[in-house]
Image: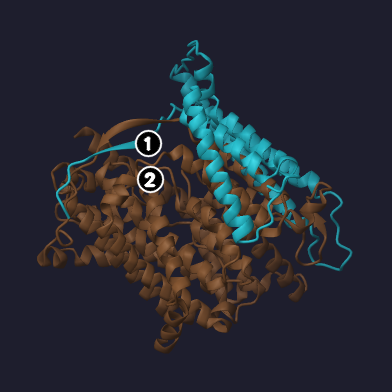
Chain colours: A brown, B cyan
Amino acid sequence: MFEMFIIGFSQILNPLSFSMIVLGVLLGIIFGVIPGLTGSMAVALCLPLTYKLGAIPAIVLIMGIYIGGCSGGLISAILLNIPGTPSNIATSYDGHPMANRGEAGKALGVGIFYSFLGGLFSFIILFLIAEPIARVAVKFGPIEYFSIGLFSLTMIGGLSGKSVPKGLAAGLIGVALSFIGMSEVDGTPRMTMGIVQLNAGLQLLPALIGLYAVSELIKSKQTKKIEMRTADYKIRGFGFTWSEFKQQFGNFLRSATLGTFIGILPGIGGITSNILAYSVAKSSSKHPERFGTGIIDGIVAPETSNNAAVGGALVPLLTLGIPGDGFTAIVLGALMVHGLTPGPLLMTNSKDFVYAIFASLVIANFLTVFFEYFGIKLFVRILRVPKHILLSVVLVLSVVGAIGLRNQVFDAWTVLIFGVVGYLMSLLDFPLTPIILGFILGPIVETNLRRALMLTHGSVLPFFTKPFSLVFLILAVISVVLAPRLIAKSNQKIVAPTTASSEK
Amino acid sequence: MDSHESTAIIQTREEKQFTMKDNVKNLLSCAVVFFVGIWIYVATIGAKSFAAAQIQPQKIPRIVAVALFALGFLLLATTILSWKRDHGSGAKIEVSSKNIGWRGWVEKNTALLTFILIFLYIFLMKKTGFVTITTCYLCLQITILSGALSGRQILRNFFISVVIALIVFFIFNKGFALSLPLNSLGF
């Protein structure tokens, strides 16, 4: 493994790849800092660039955006009480009260440092378990893949929204959209409505850009300049003492484990993990009443867990080809553009490439700390950049990216259609992540079911007699049964601290 | 790092109060779910494989359609129950009939105008060429999103749009050899 890491580092420590990581991290932090802009938009912005790059510089650029974007949101959450991304919601509960007390530097230092540690923890887990999982997964056949796909579908539908039926419906709508075009098993055209261009199906990347970037632009309202005061943000060291570090070790370990585990589960990412880690830290604390008043425990938990979810989300993507969240879905699309299909075969046949990704994660994590620590003034200034210009440029680059994919203007229409679908769905409170994950999982479930039934001559018994398949089918049932309870609990936890802070 | 008490002029989105009631949203959601279910069913008519297969290509889409119908009915049932409860409590929706000017109309219909702009942007790209249509699109989109409708501000937006359109064109068309639609003048 050590030798592979050296090979991985040697592949990215060249001027082009390194500058791509730097660019990615900076863009990720910038888009994370500005509330309303997302890492997915930053990817849409960079996508046309990646077509002409090699696979490694392209993917390390996207990894840089991923890592930077996850951490950047803590700056506005602490200084302005406006989380830059949904993954930083819980950070503002204690971060902003600390900032108001004149401890913004300490809050930022703690947030930046534990974001880094959380990311590093999950990468170590990723490095340790990815290869063994891939070695097992390489023996999986269509029966196991069908069961894993089904389990993933129930997870995304049940756990990524406020309402179970809407989450499931969103996932199924995504599945339905994936059926457009020729069926993979026998090449029969379906649901094409006579449009020849649809025979090849809808492309993943224009769909992603439409759902995540264009729908945000359509949703955006007029912006007006208003003056907001940011808190004093002087940082000395990382703002905490050695004894505080020792006190927080248990909180860190628990939050990092929780974040990594949640990241591994398909469809649930940093958003759930940061709120859940905050709630667990609060309920395990000897002084739960102090949460929400501005204590570092309330920053350590969410910032560790949301960054730990990053490494976790890459586990199913790299080992099984199943994305863990919306962003890893984009990574999947970007890999496919470069002719690489994530899954156990990528892990076994293109080890050097996978270790280059691992190495880029470590470097991006270090660069994120460096840029956030020394560039905090710059990022606060970036909040002044007019959002109406940024959003408009993102749209232009999204269209360029879509056209550049196959040199077809038709793909730009896919971007618009998915943008409108995303806008209307979010108006009606349908979660968007299940749509895109359903879009990816649909063909996995269908193709493997059809292949499996061909192999078993129509018998469904092997789905229950093969141990891995049975385990995932049981997990699918459990997730459907438990989802409503978890959603109800999660909603309570989101409401509770907000209410508490508004009461103060 | 120096101690720094600063003020930052930032952009905040002027969020409109979302007034669509949950029950109305849920009813519309049911309609969407039923519509997609029906569309899947209709769109898979005639999709039969000539190959011998255990499952025909229309089978799984139709299972998805049935599952969507079931979820639609579940949503409908919960909406009706919730509607009855709200009706019993005498909850009323207040409708504002405030008169708004054309600036207000633009602000109120930002989403619709943005959609129309993107539609025209893609539709006219082949005919007018990338640089021309991108300049027009950016100028109008920035104007609508900023709400700055005075002549001077529009002129400034136009200048910004020309610069951005040219930069994007030269980077991707000339630099990265991406094939972007061109007009007869070559841009």
Q: Which mark is residue B11?
A: 1
Asked if residue A9 lies left or right of residue A154, the reply is left
Under circle 1, the secondary element is strand
Q: Nearer the viewer, residue B121 or B84?
A: B121
Asked if residue A432 lies left or right of residue A26, the reply is right
Name the residue at the bottom extreme.
Answer: A3
The image position of residue A32, as x and y in percent, is: 39, 51
The image position of residue A50, as x and y in percent, is: 56, 63
Q: Residues within 10 Å of mark 2 (few under 14, many from 20)?
A: many
Residues behind callouts 2 and 1 on a single chain: no
Name the residue at the front extreme.
Answer: B185
- Chain containing mark 1: B
Residue, disc 2 = A34
Q: Amino acid at mark 1?
A: Gln
Under circle 2, the secondary element is loop
Residue B35 seen anywhere in this rendered image of the structure: yes
Q: Nearer the viewer, residue A160 or B121?
A: B121
Q: Amino acid at mark 2?
A: Ile
Q: Residues within 10 Å of mark 1 (few under 14, many from 20)?
A: many
Q: Nearer the viewer, residue A313 or B31?
A: A313
Image quarter of the N terminus of chain A: bottom left
Asked if residue A237 lies left or right of residue B122, the reply is left
- Chain containing mark 2: A
